Image (cartoon, rainbow, N blue to C red):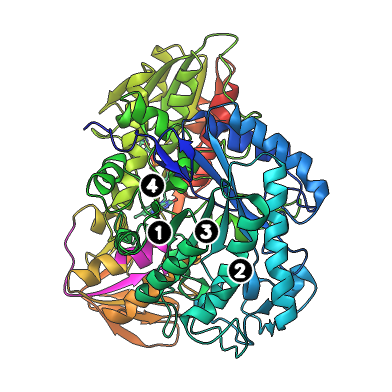
Amino acid sequence: MKFEKLLSPIEINGLELKNRMSMAPMVTNFATREGVVTQQLKDYYEERAKGGVGIIVVEACCVSYPIGLSTAQQIGVYDDRQIPGLKELVDVIHRHDCKICFQLHHAGHRATRSLVGYQPVSASEIADKGRWNQWIGGESPRALTTGEVEEMVKAFAAGAERAKAAGADAVEIHGAHGYLVLNFLSPLYNRRTDKYGGDVEGRTTFAREITQLIRKSLGNEFPILFRISGEESVEGGLELEEAQTICSILEKAGVDAFDVVSGSHDAYQEVIPPADFAPGWRVYMAEAIKKTVSVPVMTTGRIQDPRLAEKILREGRADLIGLGRALVCDPEFPSKIAQGRVDEIRRCIACNRGCIDRLRTIDLEGNSLMTCLQNPMVGREKEFALQPAEVKKRVVVIGGGAAGMEAAVVAASRGHEVILLEKKNVLGGQVTLAAIPPYKDEVSNVVRYLESQLSKFGVRTELGKEATPESVELLKPDVVILATGGLPYIPTIPGIDRENVITAWDVLGGKETGNTVVVAGGGMVGCETAEFLAEKGKKVTLVEQLPVIAQDMDFVRKGMLLERFDEYPVVIKRNVKIREITGDGVITGDGEKIAADTIVLALGVVANRDLEMSLRNNRWELYCVGDCDKPGNLMTGIHRAFHVARRV
Ligand SMILES: Cc1cc2nc3c(=O)[nH]c(=O)nc-3n(C[C@H](O)[C@H](O)[C@H](O)COP(=O)(O)OP(=O)(O)OC[C@H]3O[C@@H](n4cnc5c(N)ncnc54)[C@H](O)[C@@H]3O)c2cc1C
């Protein structure tokens, strides 16, 4: 496929972009606590600019401190002292023929008292429900007075002025995702009776005044973008028809392009849609808005395949494509398209592990920084940049799962001679099973990408070759990387060796079960296997000894899965331990009998380190990576493999 549309230039109010790919704003938390741009931020964005994207919309920049903050290390445009840092960022991005736009943001009712020190503010005193209750915020806000709203309009305009003073090419008003501007647009959250409330026209007053004041301050030539939730996706919230009206009003007020997304913190699954959503599922919203405005319209969300992006543009459903996680995962996404290397794109699998879930995890230094499951270099672009090996070594990698493949690719890309041994006839290890449950097929892209890199860097890949101490010895390695993965954990429960007991790995590998099934273990693998079986019409009971299930899943995908369990339905038994397995079911610690034809074990993984002791000697360096080092997940496995291989 040729990517003529995607690679063609486009103008936004006189600003020419070299292609139709725009980096979507995504909070990284890489700024200082004073909201100042850091070297880490510059390196992160420079890598994406270098990768060929037409414009970068720099993540939510706070316009009003502290009340508008949503994360501790957010970029600020609320203080002139932030301008020099912003300018450095602009310069870095401009070096690569890439345009830069700062997104103007106020958290509104999504702020938290613990972070900002005050009661959050909003259009009215209505707290959002923060569905699944696992994200920050959700506190009852205070309604801004009319005078305060007018001051807030000025704060947005002042932020835009600072962005322009720093040399930005454009600004974007964040009017989506449950933050202050959407709080005003929303019929659910705006119950005001002053000029900022009422009908759709009244609710748009705040956004319109912000647009008009920015236009007045920055002149007619300065591009203003507006990000809108085409649907707020909560009962009583903003719907597409009203969003169309809002966009018409804002176009007249001076908006030069619309970036159409959806959702709010009541529908967080839509803010950063995981793989449970079909690629391009919300393009229809941009398409509808495009019918009511004459300026360019961008569609963003779950567009990770350039072929889909090109198709959307060719069909005239949108004018620009917003790329978020796709560029976190592979900064070179645009240049690979331009160079005809589409098959080499490391495609985002929409797992939300590193980019989103990590923002909720505080590290040892008190930070919660973005990363990526497949790309360990995110936010460490300079520090972790791969260097050619000083001494060329023969590296033998044992195990062709994700961790072994990553280690092999990284070592080979640095110039080592690499031999990869895999005992099965296919690569991928557990990923071949991980991709089987519903909504999981994207995971196989991890293997597809690594496979392309193995051949690119000339790794000698030997399938159907089980490594033994003798076969490794014959290869005369300098370095051995053990990546033999894990094996299902089988505890000593009476009856565990009965014929009616199989593992989740067996089921996902194609083994049949009876019609009624007990899945033992409510972690991610147990839950996903339960869904896989329920979808086939099996009657499933999921038994977990802890009070919670799916603890090891990211919170968005977990929330969606639990809702689907209600639909099937899957019976979930928490705080229940299996005491014994019989020929027709299980007996719990309380003596309850749960009837089942088949018992499926999903009780975790143990490291497969059988070879380790026999391979430990002083003739070669030995490292363990992936589940064989410590049972974990794809992110822990890939990251550890990357770090071992970048140093050997
Ligand atoms: C059903 C399921 C769903 C999952 N879903 C997710 C998910 O959504 N997200 C996530 O992050 N993680 C998920 N995981 C976990 C993740 O897949 C694993 O943590 C990861 O794949 C482990 O990779 P690995 O390379 O360390 O090991 P493995 O994938 O186990 O690979 C080890 C490889 O070594 C080979 N091998 C073993 N011994 C030898 C030998 N002697 N010689 C040669 N080859 C040998 C094996 O055949 C295998 O191919 C899931 C796991 C399962 C089972």
Q: Earlier in the sequence, mark 2 or mark 3?
A: 2
Q: Earlier in the sequence, mark 1 or mark 2?
A: 2
Q: Earlier in the sequence, mark 4 or mark 1?
A: 1
Q: Secondary structure at mark 3?
A: loop
For image coordinates 24% across by 72% down, the residue present is 534
The amino acid sitting under disc 2 is Glu
Q: Earlier in the sequence, mark 4 or mark 2?
A: 2
**Number of residues whose C-alpha sits closer than 10 Å to that of mark 4, classed few (under 14), some (14–19) or many (20 or more):** many
The residue pinned by badge 4 equals 321
**Viewer-proximal residue among 325 and 308:** 308
The amino acid sitting under disc 4 is Ile
Q: Where residue 616 is drawn, which disc sits there?
A: none
Is 328 placed above or below 259 here?
Answer: above
**Number of residues whose C-alpha sits closer than 10 Å to that of mark 2, classed few (under 14), some (14–19) or many (20 or more):** some
The residue pinned by badge 1 equals 274
**Viewer-proximal residue among 414 and 586:** 414
Q: Where residue 209 is drawn, which disc sits there?
A: 2
**Number of residues whose C-alpha sits closer than 10 Å to that of mark 1, classed few (under 14), some (14–19) or many (20 or more):** many
Real-space Cα separation, disc 2 to disc 3, in angstroms: 10 Å
Q: Percent position (x, y) of residue 106?
A: 65, 65
Real-space Cα separation, disc 4 to disc 3, in angstroms: 21 Å
Q: Residue furthest top?
A: 391
Tag nearer the camera, 4 or 1:
4
Specify the quadrant that holds the N terminus.
top left
